[in-house]
Amino acid sequence: DTGVSQDPRHKITKRGQNVTFRCDPISEHNRLYWYRQTLGQGPEFLTYFQNEAQLEKSRLLSDRFSAERPKGSFSTLEIQRTEQGDSAMYLCASQAVVPGEQYFGPGTRLTVT
Amino acid sequence: GEDVEQSLFLSVREGDSSVINCTYTDSSSTYLYWYKQEPGAGLQLLTYIFSNMDMKQDQRLTVLLNKKDKHLSLRIADTQTGDSAIYFCAEWSGAAGNKLTFGGGTRVLVKP
């Protein structure tokens, strides 16, 4: 399978804990995006990388959120001191050509109790 | 700023055509997309259209773009029960940042 993969698929955590999600994009896609989707809404942009450089961050991305793509391949999204409002589906997408087709992974569903 | 609007719900009988509508506000949008999302899953890219095109057809899917009215539609011919899902339109605008801006989604229910 050469699609976008995300790990874990589901995460349940207690308020105040830190969580980290991983995204593996389609091989050789140099653009990688993170989106957040809450119930009944469309995905909202969080941040994107061009290779290893993080080029844009949404104001939705508070100081508790950090994303990395150290070698320009996989990416991680960390949320520190989770809050109940962080409960959502976190989606990763990758893209080879800009503009062009953007392919999404299956998402990581986070539940903060 | 950019804004993308969709109707919330569409019910259609199996075998009929479905038409899902979308409006957007950013006149500098270069590409417009349709994605499908099934319960608990990620988004599946269905098709996309470049802003200098009026229409694009791909098997059962037809996309119509009215750039003057900033209106996009997706027609699904011979709708099947497997087409039941949430459909999102999205716009790409380099001017508004290099990202997709999504509508809220249209839930399509196909009745046998």
Image (spheres, coloured by chain):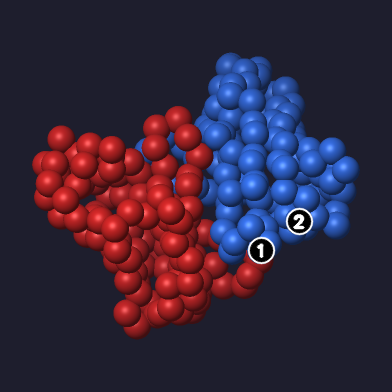
Chain colours: A red, B blue
Cα distance between the residues tagged 1 and 2: 8 Å
| Mark 2 lies on residue | B28
Count of picture labels: 2
Q: Quadrant of the C terminus of chain A?
A: top left
Do the residues indicated by labels 1 and 2 lie within the same chain of the protein? yes
Taking depth in this image into account, of B1 and A22 the one nearest to the observer is: B1
Residue A86 lies, in percent from the top left, at: 28, 43
Q: For mark 2, does the 10 Å Cα neighbourhood hold few (<14), some (14 to 19), or many (20 or more) residues?
A: some
Looking at the image, can residue A106 be seen? Answer: no
Q: For mark 1, does the 10 Å Cα neighbourhood hold few (<14), some (14 to 19), or many (20 or more) residues?
A: some
Q: Is residue A4 left or right of residue B104?
A: left
Determine the secondary structure under disc 2: loop
Asked if marks 1 and 2 touch (Cβ < 8 Å), the reply is: yes
Q: Is residue A21 above or below residue B57?
A: below
Q: What type is the residue that disc 1 sits on?
A: Gly
Q: Chain of mark 1?
A: B
Q: Which label belongs to residue B94?
A: 1
Residue B65 lies, in percent from the top left, at: 82, 44
Q: Is residue B112 left or right of residue A44?
A: right
Residue drawn at x 28%, y 38% is A85
Q: Is residue A105 left or right of residue B34?
A: left
Q: Is residue A75 above or below residue B31?
A: below
Residue drawn at x 84%, y 46% is B67
Q: What type is the residue that disc 2 sits on?
A: Ser
Looking at the image, can residue A9 be seen? Answer: yes
- State which tag comes first along the sequence, 1 or 2: 2
Residue B61 lies, in percent from the top left, at: 73, 42
